[in-house]
Image (spheres, rainbow, N blue to C red):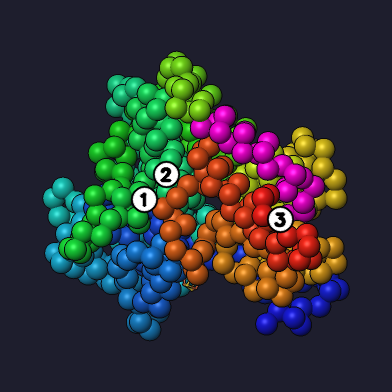
């Protein structure tokens, strides 16, 4: 299917082929689903909302609820105010959430709908809440929309009452419920009291009970979001994704913040654990030390299969940077790092990583597509490809071992339940990477070189 991609790279400014991102509302809905008893609401046409829900459902294999303002020609010309007010009334009457989290779409942004006025004028039942954020999809990506929705929730809800609550506010980055569970496990082991926003564990990985529950047990409680303003400190995991909410909470409620990379691999998990240690003043428990030692042991035992292997990694910026740091810890060379999300921080952070590990001839680029990555690979190949499902066509065309990691993964199961973060996530990643490389060795070797014990 991708066999016709030319080797020669020519400059393209306004065309993306096989893009490495999706639109802002996908992230905004995902963030809103991480709030307990929340109905995400798409202020635009039904087609947008259907696409966003479908995209999330295909990755998580779970229902992704969201309502729509259902724009038709009339709303597109005269504005969607009456659509939104009717929607708010109907949603509270029929679906009874505690909170509706509204995000905009390209259409409502282009006509300039004034969401603050619409929401102020809407009839909101006593004790219920409506918040909003702006998510024009011609800016940023799903990662931007995710971050914007968290800022929107803080903007409407969080308050500094002057009484500290002793808690840590954690912004987990654009990660799976399995990662969020791992982060919570680490914080609990470190004896840290926390509020995590959003928390999609227990929502997008809810168990089968035999009864459909529109609002599963998980999600950050509205009262906890209000209380974020009283936290002692916030940590934003994922320096690109979580910086906006952390900065906004500091600006609005004077909560100081630390910005850390996603805790993928040994050193980046160490950084997270040590930040928790400084916050709580609690010793690192043996359970975490043991996991760390196991991960280091695995990397030592298996390094001969990964040393100097060249890898191309693509996907969301913070995930790619975390995966690259772990690849370097495995002795691999992250030859190509790409993301579809615009922003120069990705390239600067990747460059710092290359310099730290002293690797040369590696390239990192933001706001690019898989077409370009394939062209690079055609010119100078790699031993492994890591990223979401869209790369499987590239992996097939170029015959490269492929590890699925990140977002979206549309053609496999279980991935969202298990972590990439933390020492446990590192073990899982190491297993996936090693299995891909060793399967390839078994496939390609001569019969007489086939090893039983590796
Ligand atoms: S019109 Fe905009 S918001 Fe709607 S699906 Fe397309 S990119 Fe997303």
Q: Who comes first in sequence, dot 1 or dot 2?
A: 2
For image coordinates 26% across by 43% down, the residue present is 222
Q: Tell me if residue 398 can be seen.
A: yes
What span is in magenta?
291-311
Eye-nearest disc, 1 or 3: 3
For image coordinates 53% across by 47% down, the residue present is 428
For image coordinates 32% across by 76% down, the residue present is 70
Q: Tell me if residue 168 can be seen.
A: no
Pick whichever, 64 or 331, lies toward us. Answer: 331
Is residue 251 positioned above or below 240 on the image? above
Secondary structure at badge 3 equals: loop
Q: How far from the left and from the top, in percent, is residue 307?
A: 77, 45
For image coordinates 31% across by 24% down, the residue present is 165
Residue labelled with disc 3:
451
Secondary structure at badge 1 equals: loop
Alpha-carbon span between mark 3 and mark 2: 39 Å
Q: Residues within 10 Å of mark 3 (few under 14, many from 20)?
A: few
Quadrant of the rendered image containing residue 118:
bottom left
Residue labelled with disc 1:
200
Please report contact status of discs 1 and 2: CB closer than 8 Å, yes or no.
Answer: yes
Magenta span includes 252: no
């Amino acid at each position: 299917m991708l066999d016709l991609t030319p080797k020669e790279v020519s400059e393209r400014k306004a065309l993306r082929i096989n893009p490495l991102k999706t639109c802002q509302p996908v992230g905004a809905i995902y963030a809103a689903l991480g709030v307990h008893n929340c109905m995400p609401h798409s202020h635009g046409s039904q087609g947008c909302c259907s696409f966003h829900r479908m995209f999330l459902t295909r990755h998580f294999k779970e229902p992704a609820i969201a309502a729509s303002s259902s724009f038709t020609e009339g709303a597109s010309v005269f504005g969607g105010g009456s659509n939104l007010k009717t929607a708010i009334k109907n949603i509270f009457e029929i679906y009874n959430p505690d909170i509706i989290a509204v995000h905009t779409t390209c259409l409502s942004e282009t006509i300039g709908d004034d969401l603050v006025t619409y929401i102020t004028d809407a009839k909101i039942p006593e004790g219920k809440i409506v918040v909003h954020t702006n998510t024009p999809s011609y800016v940023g990506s799903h990662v931007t929309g995710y971050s914007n929705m968290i800022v929107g929730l803080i903007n409407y809800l969080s308050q500094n009452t002057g009484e500290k609550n002793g808690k840590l506010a954690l912004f987990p980055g654009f990660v799976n419920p399995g990662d969020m569970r791992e982060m919570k496990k680490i914080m609990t082991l470190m004896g840290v009291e926390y509020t995590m926003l959003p928390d999609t564990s227990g929502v997008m990985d809810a168990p089968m009970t035999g009864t459909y529950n529109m609002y599963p047990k998980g999600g950050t409680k509205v009262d906890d979001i209000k209380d974020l303003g009283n936290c002692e400190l916030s940590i934003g995991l994922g320096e690109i994704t979580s910086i906006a909410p952390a900065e906004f909470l500091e600006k609005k409620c004077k909560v100081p913040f630390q910005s850390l990379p996603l805790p993928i691999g040994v050193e980046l998990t160490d950084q997270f654990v040590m930040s928790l240690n400084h916050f709580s003043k609690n010793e690192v428990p043996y359970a975490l030390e043991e996991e760390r030692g196991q991960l280091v042991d695995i990397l030592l035992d298996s390094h001969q299969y990964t040393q100097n292997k060249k890898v191309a990694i693509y996907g969301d910026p913070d995930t790619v940077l975390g995966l690259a740091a772990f690849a370097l810890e495995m002795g691999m060379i992250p030859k190509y790092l790409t993301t579809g999300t615009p922003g120069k921080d990705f390239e600067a952070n990747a460059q710092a990583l290359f310099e730290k590990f002293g690797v040369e001839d590696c390239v990192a680029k933001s706001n690019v597509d898989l077409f370009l990555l394939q062209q690079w690979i055609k010119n100078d190949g790699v031993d492994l490809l890591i990223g979401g499902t869209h790369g499987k066509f590239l992996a097939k065309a170029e015959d490269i071992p492929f590890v699925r990691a990140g977002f979206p993964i549309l053609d496999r199961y279980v991935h969202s339940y298990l972590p990439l973060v933390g020492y446990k996530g590192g073990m899982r990643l190491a297993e996936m990477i090693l299995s891909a490389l060793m399967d390839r060795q078994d496939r390609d070797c001569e019969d007489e070189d086939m090893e039983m014990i590796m």
